[in-house]
Image: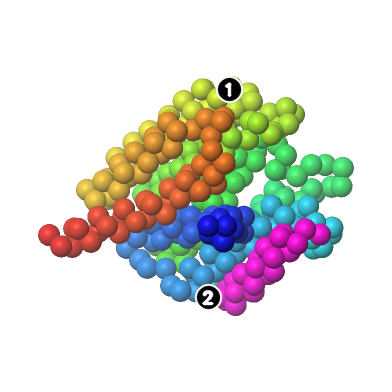
Amino acid sequence: MKLLKDVFKFYLHSSIHVGLAVLSLLWATSYFLNNIPGKGLSIFVFCSTIATYNFIKYGVEAHKYLIVSNRYHRSIQFFSIANQGLALIYIGQLNKSGLILLLFVAFLIAIYAIPIYPRLKNLRNYGIPKVLLVALVWTLITSLLPMLQFDVVWGWDRYLDLTQRFLLILVLMVPFEIRDLNVDLPELRTIPQRIGETATKALGYSLAIVYFLLTFLKDDLHPQELMNQAVLLLLLILILVSTSRRQSEYYAAFWVEAVPVIWLGVIWVLDLLQLSF
Protein backbone atom coordinates (compact mmCIF):
# COMPACT_ATOMS: atom_id res chain seq x y z
CA MET A 1 0.00 0.00 0.00
CA LYS A 2 2.85 2.36 0.85
CA LEU A 3 4.43 1.65 -2.54
CA LEU A 4 1.20 2.61 -4.32
CA LYS A 5 0.98 5.82 -2.30
CA ASP A 6 4.59 6.67 -3.13
CA VAL A 7 4.00 6.01 -6.84
CA PHE A 8 0.84 8.13 -6.78
CA LYS A 9 2.63 11.00 -5.05
CA PHE A 10 5.49 10.87 -7.54
CA TYR A 11 2.94 10.76 -10.38
CA LEU A 12 1.42 14.02 -9.12
CA HIS A 13 4.54 15.76 -7.83
CA SER A 14 6.54 15.07 -11.00
CA SER A 15 3.76 16.65 -13.11
CA ILE A 16 2.95 13.52 -15.12
CA HIS A 17 -0.73 14.18 -14.41
CA VAL A 18 -0.42 17.75 -15.69
CA GLY A 19 1.35 16.45 -18.79
CA LEU A 20 -1.54 14.08 -19.50
CA ALA A 21 -4.04 16.92 -19.03
CA VAL A 22 -2.21 19.13 -21.52
CA LEU A 23 -1.81 16.24 -23.96
CA SER A 24 -5.53 15.43 -23.67
CA LEU A 25 -6.50 18.99 -24.58
CA LEU A 26 -4.09 18.87 -27.52
CA TRP A 27 -5.73 15.67 -28.73
CA ALA A 28 -9.22 17.12 -28.20
CA THR A 29 -8.30 20.12 -30.35
CA SER A 30 -6.90 17.81 -33.02
CA TYR A 31 -10.07 15.72 -32.97
CA PHE A 32 -12.29 18.72 -33.63
CA LEU A 33 -9.93 19.78 -36.42
CA ASN A 34 -10.30 16.31 -37.98
CA ASN A 35 -6.59 15.62 -37.56
CA ILE A 36 -4.43 13.26 -35.55
CA PRO A 37 -1.34 14.76 -33.89
CA GLY A 38 1.77 12.83 -34.79
CA LYS A 39 3.96 11.00 -32.32
CA GLY A 40 6.54 13.78 -32.42
CA LEU A 41 4.12 16.57 -31.48
CA SER A 42 2.50 14.48 -28.75
CA ILE A 43 5.80 13.46 -27.15
CA PHE A 44 7.17 16.98 -27.37
CA VAL A 45 4.13 18.57 -25.69
CA PHE A 46 3.88 15.88 -22.99
CA CYS A 47 7.58 15.84 -22.08
CA SER A 48 8.12 19.60 -22.28
CA THR A 49 5.08 20.16 -20.06
CA ILE A 50 6.54 17.90 -17.39
CA ALA A 51 9.96 19.55 -17.57
CA THR A 52 8.54 23.07 -17.55
CA TYR A 53 6.12 22.54 -14.68
CA ASN A 54 8.78 20.90 -12.56
CA PHE A 55 11.16 23.77 -13.25
CA ILE A 56 8.50 26.24 -12.14
CA LYS A 57 7.66 24.23 -9.02
CA TYR A 58 11.14 23.20 -7.93
CA GLY A 59 13.79 24.83 -10.10
CA VAL A 60 13.03 28.40 -9.06
CA GLU A 61 13.60 27.33 -5.44
CA ALA A 62 16.94 25.71 -6.24
CA HIS A 63 20.33 27.39 -5.94
CA LYS A 64 21.01 29.03 -9.31
CA TYR A 65 17.95 27.12 -10.59
CA LEU A 66 19.98 23.90 -10.75
CA ILE A 67 21.20 22.64 -7.38
CA VAL A 68 18.42 20.85 -5.49
CA SER A 69 19.21 19.83 -1.91
CA ASN A 70 16.13 17.70 -1.23
CA ARG A 71 16.71 14.05 -2.22
CA TYR A 72 13.10 13.52 -3.34
CA HIS A 73 13.23 16.68 -5.43
CA ARG A 74 16.50 15.51 -6.99
CA SER A 75 14.73 12.39 -8.28
CA ILE A 76 12.11 14.67 -9.85
CA GLN A 77 14.90 16.82 -11.27
CA PHE A 78 16.52 13.82 -12.99
CA PHE A 79 13.11 12.77 -14.30
CA SER A 80 12.57 16.29 -15.63
CA ILE A 81 15.96 16.34 -17.36
CA ALA A 82 15.11 13.06 -19.09
CA ASN A 83 11.80 14.51 -20.28
CA GLN A 84 13.49 17.68 -21.46
CA GLY A 85 15.92 15.55 -23.43
CA LEU A 86 13.05 13.72 -25.14
CA ALA A 87 11.34 17.04 -25.89
CA LEU A 88 14.51 18.36 -27.54
CA ILE A 89 14.73 15.24 -29.71
CA TYR A 90 11.25 15.87 -31.13
CA ILE A 91 11.27 19.67 -31.26
CA GLY A 92 12.60 19.47 -34.80
CA GLN A 93 9.25 18.07 -35.95
CA LEU A 94 7.56 21.41 -35.27
CA ASN A 95 7.11 23.59 -38.34
CA LYS A 96 8.37 27.17 -38.55
CA SER A 97 5.14 28.68 -37.21
CA GLY A 98 5.13 26.23 -34.32
CA LEU A 99 8.74 27.07 -33.42
CA ILE A 100 8.01 30.81 -33.43
CA LEU A 101 5.02 30.22 -31.16
CA LEU A 102 7.21 28.11 -28.89
CA LEU A 103 9.72 30.95 -28.52
CA PHE A 104 6.90 33.28 -27.48
CA VAL A 105 5.58 30.72 -24.99
CA ALA A 106 9.08 30.28 -23.56
CA PHE A 107 9.26 34.04 -23.02
CA LEU A 108 5.90 34.02 -21.21
CA ILE A 109 7.02 31.14 -18.99
CA ALA A 110 10.27 32.96 -18.20
CA ILE A 111 8.54 36.13 -16.99
CA TYR A 112 6.09 33.96 -15.06
CA ALA A 113 8.76 32.04 -13.17
CA ILE A 114 11.85 34.28 -13.10
CA PRO A 115 11.99 37.92 -11.93
CA ILE A 116 13.01 40.23 -14.77
CA TYR A 117 14.94 42.38 -12.29
CA PRO A 118 16.43 41.12 -9.00
CA ARG A 119 14.28 43.40 -6.84
CA LEU A 120 11.06 42.66 -8.69
CA LYS A 121 8.79 39.67 -8.19
CA ASN A 122 7.92 37.30 -11.02
CA LEU A 123 4.37 37.30 -12.40
CA ARG A 124 3.65 34.18 -10.36
CA ASN A 125 3.40 36.51 -7.38
CA TYR A 126 0.65 38.69 -8.87
CA GLY A 127 -2.80 37.14 -8.48
CA ILE A 128 -4.83 38.13 -11.55
CA PRO A 129 -1.95 38.45 -14.09
CA LYS A 130 -0.78 34.99 -13.00
CA VAL A 131 -4.16 33.42 -13.79
CA LEU A 132 -4.44 35.14 -17.17
CA LEU A 133 -0.89 34.19 -18.14
CA VAL A 134 -1.37 30.52 -17.24
CA ALA A 135 -4.62 30.40 -19.23
CA LEU A 136 -2.90 32.05 -22.20
CA VAL A 137 0.03 29.61 -22.20
CA TRP A 138 -2.25 26.57 -21.98
CA THR A 139 -4.37 27.99 -24.82
CA LEU A 140 -1.37 28.60 -27.04
CA ILE A 141 0.06 25.11 -26.52
CA THR A 142 -3.13 23.03 -26.55
CA SER A 143 -5.11 24.96 -29.17
CA LEU A 144 -3.02 27.32 -31.30
CA LEU A 145 0.00 25.01 -31.67
CA PRO A 146 -1.94 22.13 -33.28
CA MET A 147 -3.73 24.63 -35.53
CA LEU A 148 -0.38 25.90 -36.76
CA GLN A 149 0.99 22.38 -37.15
CA PHE A 150 -2.01 21.26 -39.18
CA ASP A 151 -1.94 24.49 -41.23
CA VAL A 152 -5.69 24.93 -40.78
CA VAL A 153 -7.75 27.46 -42.70
CA TRP A 154 -8.28 30.41 -40.39
CA GLY A 155 -11.76 31.74 -39.83
CA TRP A 156 -14.41 32.59 -37.27
CA ASP A 157 -14.61 29.08 -35.84
CA ARG A 158 -10.89 28.94 -35.09
CA TYR A 159 -11.02 32.18 -33.10
CA LEU A 160 -13.98 30.79 -31.19
CA ASP A 161 -11.94 27.65 -30.44
CA LEU A 162 -9.14 29.76 -28.97
CA THR A 163 -11.57 31.84 -26.91
CA GLN A 164 -13.30 28.74 -25.58
CA ARG A 165 -10.01 27.12 -24.61
CA PHE A 166 -8.95 30.25 -22.74
CA LEU A 167 -12.26 30.28 -20.83
CA LEU A 168 -11.98 26.56 -20.10
CA ILE A 169 -8.58 26.98 -18.47
CA LEU A 170 -9.87 29.90 -16.40
CA VAL A 171 -12.71 27.73 -15.09
CA LEU A 172 -10.33 24.86 -14.30
CA MET A 173 -8.16 27.24 -12.29
CA VAL A 174 -11.00 28.27 -9.95
CA PRO A 175 -10.61 25.26 -7.59
CA PHE A 176 -6.87 25.94 -7.34
CA GLU A 177 -7.40 29.61 -6.58
CA ILE A 178 -9.94 28.81 -3.86
CA ARG A 179 -7.73 26.06 -2.41
CA ASP A 180 -4.80 28.45 -2.18
CA LEU A 181 -6.78 30.89 -0.04
CA ASN A 182 -5.29 28.98 2.88
CA VAL A 183 -1.70 29.74 1.90
CA ASP A 184 -1.70 32.80 -0.38
CA LEU A 185 -0.27 35.96 1.13
CA PRO A 186 -2.74 38.88 1.32
CA GLU A 187 -0.61 41.04 -0.99
CA LEU A 188 -1.15 38.59 -3.86
CA ARG A 189 -4.67 39.97 -4.26
CA THR A 190 -5.98 36.84 -5.96
CA ILE A 191 -9.55 36.75 -7.24
CA PRO A 192 -10.90 34.82 -4.22
CA GLN A 193 -9.12 37.26 -1.91
CA ARG A 194 -10.75 40.17 -3.71
CA ILE A 195 -14.33 38.91 -4.07
CA GLY A 196 -14.56 35.89 -1.78
CA GLU A 197 -15.06 32.16 -2.29
CA THR A 198 -18.78 32.27 -3.19
CA ALA A 199 -18.41 35.02 -5.77
CA THR A 200 -15.38 33.28 -7.29
CA LYS A 201 -17.40 30.09 -7.74
CA ALA A 202 -20.23 32.14 -9.28
CA LEU A 203 -17.70 33.61 -11.70
CA GLY A 204 -16.59 30.08 -12.55
CA TYR A 205 -20.17 29.01 -13.29
CA SER A 206 -20.67 32.08 -15.49
CA LEU A 207 -17.50 31.45 -17.48
CA ALA A 208 -18.44 27.77 -17.93
CA ILE A 209 -21.86 28.74 -19.30
CA VAL A 210 -20.37 31.36 -21.63
CA TYR A 211 -17.89 28.71 -22.79
CA PHE A 212 -20.73 26.37 -23.73
CA LEU A 213 -22.92 29.04 -25.35
CA LEU A 214 -20.07 30.13 -27.63
CA THR A 215 -20.39 26.72 -29.30
CA PHE A 216 -23.68 27.82 -30.85
CA LEU A 217 -21.94 30.72 -32.62
CA LYS A 218 -19.88 28.40 -34.81
CA ASP A 219 -20.48 28.39 -38.54
CA ASP A 220 -19.68 24.68 -38.80
CA LEU A 221 -21.32 23.00 -35.81
CA HIS A 222 -21.88 19.26 -35.66
CA PRO A 223 -24.32 17.63 -33.21
CA GLN A 224 -21.53 15.44 -31.84
CA GLU A 225 -19.40 18.46 -30.97
CA LEU A 226 -22.36 20.02 -29.19
CA MET A 227 -22.82 16.83 -27.19
CA ASN A 228 -19.12 16.76 -26.30
CA GLN A 229 -19.26 20.36 -25.12
CA ALA A 230 -22.39 19.63 -23.07
CA VAL A 231 -20.57 16.79 -21.32
CA LEU A 232 -17.66 19.11 -20.57
CA LEU A 233 -20.04 21.74 -19.18
CA LEU A 234 -21.47 19.10 -16.85
CA LEU A 235 -17.96 18.13 -15.70
CA LEU A 236 -17.09 21.77 -15.04
CA ILE A 237 -20.23 22.32 -12.99
CA LEU A 238 -19.53 19.19 -10.96
CA ILE A 239 -16.01 20.27 -10.05
CA LEU A 240 -17.18 23.77 -9.13
CA VAL A 241 -19.99 22.42 -6.95
CA SER A 242 -17.46 20.29 -5.06
CA THR A 243 -14.91 23.09 -4.74
CA SER A 244 -14.35 24.65 -1.34
CA ARG A 245 -11.60 26.21 0.69
CA ARG A 246 -11.41 23.00 2.73
CA GLN A 247 -11.17 20.61 -0.20
CA SER A 248 -9.28 17.34 0.10
CA GLU A 249 -5.53 17.30 -0.45
CA TYR A 250 -5.67 15.90 -3.98
CA TYR A 251 -9.00 17.31 -5.15
CA ALA A 252 -7.57 20.05 -7.35
CA ALA A 253 -4.23 18.41 -8.13
CA PHE A 254 -5.80 15.13 -9.25
CA TRP A 255 -9.53 15.35 -9.93
CA VAL A 256 -9.68 18.83 -11.45
CA GLU A 257 -6.64 18.20 -13.62
CA ALA A 258 -8.22 14.90 -14.66
CA VAL A 259 -11.13 16.73 -16.33
CA PRO A 260 -9.34 17.09 -19.72
CA VAL A 261 -8.39 13.39 -19.61
CA ILE A 262 -11.96 12.34 -18.79
CA TRP A 263 -13.32 14.65 -21.48
CA LEU A 264 -11.01 13.18 -24.12
CA GLY A 265 -12.18 9.71 -23.09
CA VAL A 266 -15.80 10.81 -23.52
CA ILE A 267 -14.99 12.26 -26.96
CA TRP A 268 -13.49 8.95 -28.07
CA VAL A 269 -16.37 6.89 -26.66
CA LEU A 270 -19.00 9.06 -28.36
CA ASP A 271 -17.04 8.84 -31.60
CA LEU A 272 -16.97 5.03 -31.38
CA LEU A 273 -20.70 4.95 -30.64
CA GLN A 274 -21.37 7.14 -33.67
CA LEU A 275 -19.31 4.85 -35.90
CA SER A 276 -21.18 1.79 -34.64
CA PHE A 277 -24.59 3.12 -35.69
- Residue that mark 2 sits on: 93
Q: Residue at x 42, y 68 (%)?
A: 37
Three-letter amino acid code of the residue under disc 2: Gln
**Residue found farthest to the front:** 1
Assess whether residue 245 is covered by the magenta stretch.
no
Q: Nearer the viewer, residue 103 or 29?
A: 29
Residue 40 lies, in percent from the top left, at 50, 74
Kindly state the secondary structure of the residue where label 1 is placed: loop
Q: Residue at x 31, y 53 (%)?
A: 266
Measured Cα–Cα span from mark 1 to mark 2: 45 Å
Residue 194 lies, in percent from the top left, at 63, 23
Image position of 129 with respect to 4: above or below: above
- Residue that mark 1 sits on: 196
Image position of 63 with respect to 249: above or below: below
Q: Residue at x 49, y 28 (%)?
A: 201
What segment carries the magenta color?
69-93
Residue 235 in view (yes/no): yes
Residue 78 figure quarter = bottom right
Residue 29 in view (yes/no): no
Sequence-first tag of 1 and 2? 2
Magenta part, dominant SS? helix
Three-letter amino acid code of the residue under disc 1: Gly
